[in-house]
Image (cartoon, rainbow, N blue to C red):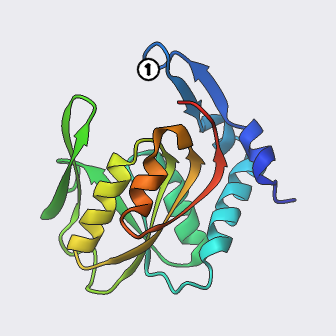
Amino acid sequence: MTILACHELQKLVRTIPDYPKPGIMFRDITTLISDPNGFKSAVVLLADRYRDMKLTFVAGIEARGFIFGSAVALELGIGFLPIRKKGKLPFRTIGEDYQLEYGMDRIEIHQDAITQGDNVLLLDDLIATGGTAAAGIDLIRRAGGVVDHAAFVIDLPDLGGADIVRSKEVDVYTLIEFEGD
């Protein structure tokens, strides 16, 4: 198997116009993950960047962050930490509220998921406005973890989310980007 270049991965992402509402160009990663070489390439490219960083966990944000985050954690030989939506975890949790376009939402982790000083890579499929990723960083840090790096398969730079994450003194790495939203 040959590892695909980022511009080849971009061709595997389907764009669906006007979803979930008019004017939105939805970037669908299901076409990338259904291609075995594309999926493997994305995972290896993400993992290679962090191989020598002595990470403890990859934290993936529900739901598509679970797909890439768990695969990257497996590739790195480290644990995977799921960041879930409110009420989805069975044990005691800590959470972080964040602003949505119309209201608030909350993400959570188990209160014993992180040990003080754990080095955590935050990973999700896409960075758009940055609200969920910023909340994930705050949550991991509040739990005692260190978050200096965040990775995303797709960046929508026009929406400014990567800059929000960088403002938290977190390095941002993305494989591909799409102009516009």
Q: Residue at x 17, y 70 (%)?
A: 111
Q: Vertical placement of 146 versus 109: above or below?
A: below
How many residues crowd around disc 1 within 10 Å: few (fewer than 14), some, or many (20 or more)? Answer: few
Q: Is residue 133 left or right of residue 104?
A: right
Which amino acid, mark 1? Pro
Compared to residue 20, the image places residue 112 above or below, namely below
Residue 14 higher or lower than 45, as above or below: above
Q: Residue at x 44, y 48 (%)?
A: 161
Tag 1, which secondary structure?
Answer: loop
Most extreme residue toward the right is: 2
Q: Is residue 173 visible?
A: yes
Residue labelled with disc 1: 20
Residue 70's x, y, as percent?
50, 62
Number of callouts in the render? Answer: 1
In the image, farthest residue toward the top: 22
Q: Quadrant of the N terminus?
A: bottom right
User: Residue at position x 61%, y 85% from top?
Assistant: 52
Query: In this orientation, which residue lies closer to the viewer: 99 or 86?
Result: 99
Relative vertical location of residue 23 with respect to residue 38 in this rendering, above or below: above
Image point (22%, 55%), residue name: 89
Q: Position of residue 177 (x, y in %)?
A: 64, 44
Image location of residue 44, percent across then percent down: 69, 65
Rendered location of residue 165, percent (x, y): 41, 58
Does residue 60 appear anywhere in the picture? Answer: no
- Quadrant assignment, res 164: bottom left
